[in-house]
Amino acid sequence: MGASVLVVSTDPQGSTMWWADRIGEALPFDFADAHDDPDSLANLRTMGAKIHVVANQKGGVGKTTITMNLAATVQDTIKSNGQTRHIFIDTPGSIEDERLLAAALDVADDVFVPLPPDPLAFDPTTRTIEKVIKPRGIPFKVVINNWDPRDSKVDMLDTLAFIEAQGWEAAETAIRRYRIHTRAPAEGKLVTQYPDNGTTLRAKQDFLRLALEQGYGG
Ligand SMILES: Nc1ncnc2c1ncn2[C@@H]1O[C@H](COP(=O)(O)OP(=O)(O)OP(=O)(O)O)[C@@H](O)[C@H]1O
Ligand SMILES: [Mg+2]
């Protein structure tokens, strides 16, 4: 029986594919790489699934981390009836690859924009949202990622204030920074596959909250 979730990579860097390869047989969702054939993305529309694009032309903000772990969480949460219900598309983190991002946005129902609580990421994120996402009229949400609750609250408050000043909507759930997330690709693991302990439960909770907040459960 097919999985409920499909992840599609459009990133020529191939980090999503590398991670998926390392997970191997234990990969819980379907996976496809479309970076060398962006026109094929148009076929996704015929599958009757909701298409979520994870985008930010600022590199290293957590697009791949969120795509893979949110997909795994949603796959775990919804009962499979053999039909693909959600498609998550990971996109490149550079301005040079805008054609690939555009092809993904052309089929998107909505967009997640990961943003770390780091002022250096504000301007490039603004460009992606104002120049690339908004002109297409696609609903989007900023997801604060890589927040370390042990840091001072200043960066988080600055980031929330910045998002509000731009008039953007933010997801209520922020994804916290955990070393286990950073190590997971090399270990060939997804958040749903972390061994249970206090930290990993919190790490799992972030993705579960985000999934439920979006109404992806059940
Ligand atoms: N919440 C988090 N906790 C810990 N590490 C994280 C978290 N989010 C991202 N990282 C780490 O930060 C780095 C960048 O994340 P990731 O590769 O997901 O970003 P990206 O936006 O996909 O980058 P690119 O633009 O290069 O595709 C990776 O090493 C990843 O493991
Ligand atoms: Mg990436």
Image (tube, rainbow, N blue to C red):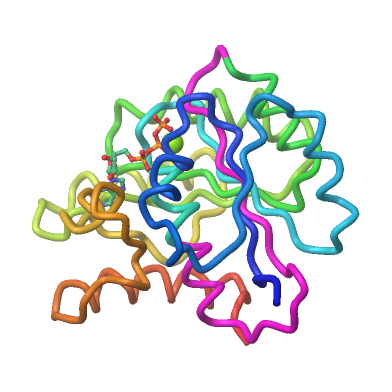
Compared with 177, 132 (above or below) is above
The image shows residue 218 at horizontal and vertical percentages of 63, 87
Residue 106: quarter of image: top right
Q: Quadrant of the N terminus?
A: bottom right
Outermost residue toward the right in this view:
46
> What is the magenta range?
70-96
The image shows residue 63 at horizontal and vertical percentages of 45, 43
Residue under the point 67% across and 82% down: 80
Compared with 5, 158 (above or below) is above
Residue under the point 36% across and 62% down: 190
The image shows residue 89 at horizontal and vertical percentages of 62, 46
Number of marks drawn: 0
Residue 135: quarter of image: top right
The stretch drawn in magenta includes residue 78: yes
Quadrant assignment for ligand 1: top left
Left or right of residue 37, residue 124 in this image: left
Q: Nearer the viewer, residue 129 or 55?
A: 55
Residue under the point 33% across and 72% down: 193
